[in-house]
Amino acid sequence: MILTVTLNTALDITYRVRSLRPRASHRVSQVTERPGGKGVNVARVLAALGHEVTLTGFAGGPTGELLREALAGTPGPVDALVPIAGATRRTVAVVDETAGDTTQLNEPGPQITPGEWGAFLDRYDDLLSGASAVALCGSLPPGVPVGAYAKLVRAARSAGIPVLLDTSGEPLRRGVAARPDIIKPNADELAELTGSHEPLRATQDARRRGAHAVVASFGADGLLAVTADGRWRAVPPAPELGNPTGAGDSAVAGLLSGLVEHLPWPDRLIRAVALSAATVRAPAAGEFDPAAYEKLLARVSVTAV
Amino acid sequence: MILTVTLNTALDITYRVRSLRPRASHRVSQVTERPGGKGVNVARVLAALGHEVTLTGFAGGPTGELLREALAGTPGPVDALVPIAGATRRTVAVVDETAGDTTQLNEPGPQITPGEWGAFLDRYDDLLSGASAVALCGSLPPGVPVGAYAKLVRAARSAGIPVLLDTSGEPLRRGVAARPDIIKPNADELAELTGSHEPLRATQDARRRGAHAVVASFGADGLLAVTADGRWRAVPPAPELGNPTGAGDSAVAGLLSGLVEHLPWPDRLIRAVALSAATVRAPAAGEFDPAAYEKLLARVSVTAV
């Protein structure tokens, strides 16, 4: 079983409007809701790839109930979320049908009490015993210590379980120092971590900070991986038109599935780039187009750098 | 008791962001939720003015539960909402802290079944027997017949109860023909109903379509009333800076409270304009500033036209 951790789960709401204009009043033509948060997206993609997945983190309030009902209603990841008194946050994606772009509004997340954090740590230890790999994903809700990911990385490594960390800011800085197996920063997160905007230099620098492998994502320019086995760049055949929401989470699912299947690094990177591009191409945000994925697998180029 | 009807109630959510930029991702710094929909706002203001108020309409789903819990937790209107299987809609107001303006996103509302509409009609008939006046407010959710307000106006008039209608589009056009005591269109609604953008001509034309009195609202330019007793313009002392959300609902509450207190028309209009301006000035959308209201009462000018 692969375990994904999403401490700041979300109810992802998508609004379609004719055209988003600041200061105007808009009639929303279509409302969709689905379980969200980076680790939830990673779990959904892993399940679609045929892996057994369990997801944990926090859920509470009416939004948390909706999220858990939606998870229970579909085959896929096993729900091991820890209940909290606060309400799971919402995110609102406003899709402008005329411009074809998306504006994102993210609530900060509920306050987590020390008791709830303790309950999560117990659950995490229990779940680790059955896990083949762990993904730690996304932002921390208020009340969770900033060193949370460092602690979770150390626990996984003590248990001998490979761990991937995908977060940003100070939680990433502290988590990297605990020596995770893989980190997957995007260009902004990498620059914030290292102070460098030069891709190869910044990726190498991130690895020196403690990560065993760094896979940096650069949108349509693909992935750059610096590992103990070598350095590669993996690039999609062409920039994809569509919605990039969740493309990074699909890349994480590709890397993690490749890891537990013991694929060589170049194949993991091909899978991650193909999933990422197939996610941009899918009509719904955070889903991937399986037919596009299969075709893209043969068309991603990987080169040693 | 004054009865307010809100067929399309809402959970009003307000997001504060640093600056709203289309295509960007925004961290929401503050989230507030409160019961909404025009008739709910009218009921809240009437209760603050010391009137006994009952509110009805539809509520359902997790959003409807939140709405009803919030109503139960505060003194004020009595909740006589009819339960439905669908979920009460949300509205999202995005406040741009830098520009000081608001962008509004309104969900369409839940599907109402014929059985639910029938249950509402029974409830409405029961409530009419104890009502001194009725306000019919806002849009119709999917499934409610477009002639709904015409039916509700006729029922109130048959029972001898004065009825105010505040809606737009085809529901207004049909409702007006059923001869409500008062309609309160804003400039856009008035122009849509009559085809005229000339305030006095359009207001008179709206009255000829069936309303006994028309009170048209023109934002900072105040109210224009055409009634059987005369025609007046009521103007606030100065344009108010602030959030105009709910200002029209406060005007409705002013007109309705003045009606049940048997105030002469000029005093009703002064009250409506003062409440409206005090709502724009209040820090929270849809609330009014009681101290500002008391001061404004002496400073609104009314002239016969």
Image (cartoon, coloured by chain):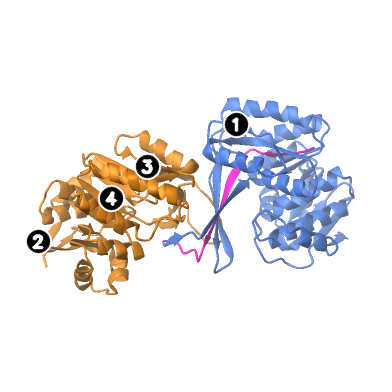
Chain colours: A blue, B orange
Q: Which element type, helix, strand or loop, lies under badge 3?
A: loop
Amino acid type shown at disc 4? Thr
Q: Name the residue under label 4.
A: B279
Q: Magenta span covers which residues?
A: A1-23
In the depicted structure, whether residue B157 falls above or below residue A123:
below
Q: Which chain carries label 4?
A: B
How far from the left and from the top, in percent, is residue B45?
A: 27, 45
Q: Can residue B146 be seen in this view?
A: yes
Q: Residues within 10 Å of mark 4 (few under 14, many from 20)?
A: many
Query: Earlier along the polypeptide chain: callout 4 or callout 3?
Result: 3
Q: Do the residues labelled 4 and 3 touch (CB within 8 Å)?
A: no
Q: Name the residue under label 2.
A: B229
Q: Tell which tag, 1 or 3, sits nearer the viewer.
A: 3
Q: Name the residue under label 3.
A: B81
Q: Are marks 4 and 3 on the same chain?
A: yes
Q: Which element type, helix, strand or loop, lies under badge 2?
A: loop
How far from the left and from the top, in percent, is residue B130?
A: 23, 40
Query: Earlier along the polypeptide chain: callout 3 or callout 2?
Result: 3
Q: Tell which tag, 2 or 4, sits nearer the viewer.
A: 2
Q: Residues within 10 Å of mark 3 (few under 14, many from 20)?
A: many
Q: Mark 1 points at which residue?
A: A83
Taking the magenta stretch, the answer to whether it contains residue A17 is yes
Q: Which chain carries label 2?
A: B
Amino acid type shown at disc 1? Pro
Q: Residues within 10 Å of mark 1 (few under 14, many from 20)?
A: some
In the depicted structure, whether residue A89 falls above or below residue A296:
above
